[in-house]
Amino acid sequence: MEKNKQLARQSVEALIDLPEDELFRKLGVTINKVGADGTLASDFALSVQTPVPQEQGAADVLGAFGRAYFNRFERQAFNLLCGDDASSEADRDKLSEAFHLTKADAAAAVTAVLIAQLALAPAVATILGALIVKLLFQPALDATCDVWSRRLNPEPAPANA
């Protein structure tokens, strides 16, 4: 587990400062690449090339695919990381500690939990971990879960009377 955590940290360090759109494109490319060759799934630092600007149509499609995948995955990750399921309590405690560290450390901890609890491929989990921390990083896990809950369950807009 410690070796995987180190590999996850090294991988997310290269991802954590990328713009969100680039992360969504990388997620789309990675999912497609792992889907075509399952032997690549365990590679924490799977090298993928996102489309160059001349291939903007492909970049848009891959970005939309990555964003859609993340949106489907997000509620499951929220329940794991912020829920009250007793079987995930130890992992939530580890994440709580990690949120007092750097973004890369927090993303590595999230990545390790995603692999252990959701059996995600490391190649995909590293990007999801970076996205989760990039989009939702707060000084404490409680604040993150509160913000995340509101993101997933927005208040309905008041009806115009």
Image (tube, rainbow, N blue to C red):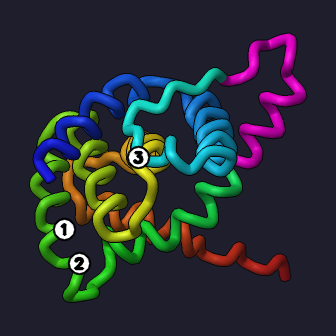
Left or right, residue 69 beside residue 61: left
Residue position marked by numbered label 2 in the rendering: 88
Residue 152 seen in render: yes
Question: What's the distance in space between the residues labelled 2 and 1, CA to CA?
Answer: 5 Å
Between marks 1 and 3, how big is the CA–CA gap?
Answer: 21 Å
Q: How far apart are the two marked residues, 2 and 3, measured between alpha carbons? A: 23 Å
What's under tag 1, amino acid-wise? Asp
Q: Residues within 10 Å of mark 2 (few under 14, many from 20)?
A: some
Q: Quadrant of residue 86?
A: bottom left
Secondary structure beneath label 2: helix
Q: The residue under label 2 is which amino acid type?
A: Ser
For marks 1 and 3, the one nearer the N-term is: 3
Residue 61 picture location, percent across and down: 82, 39
Disc number for residue 91? 1
Res 42 label: 3
Q: Main structural element of the magenta stretch: helix, strand or loop?
A: helix
What percent of the width, then of the height, locates residue 142? 24, 65
Q: Are marks 2 and 3 in contact (CB under 8 Å)?
A: no
Name the amino acid, label 3. Ser
Q: Please provide the residue range marked out in magenta.
A: 50-66
Label whose residue precedes the other's in the sequence (2 or 3): 3
Are the residues flagged by discs 2 and 1 in contact, CB closer than 8 Å?
Answer: yes
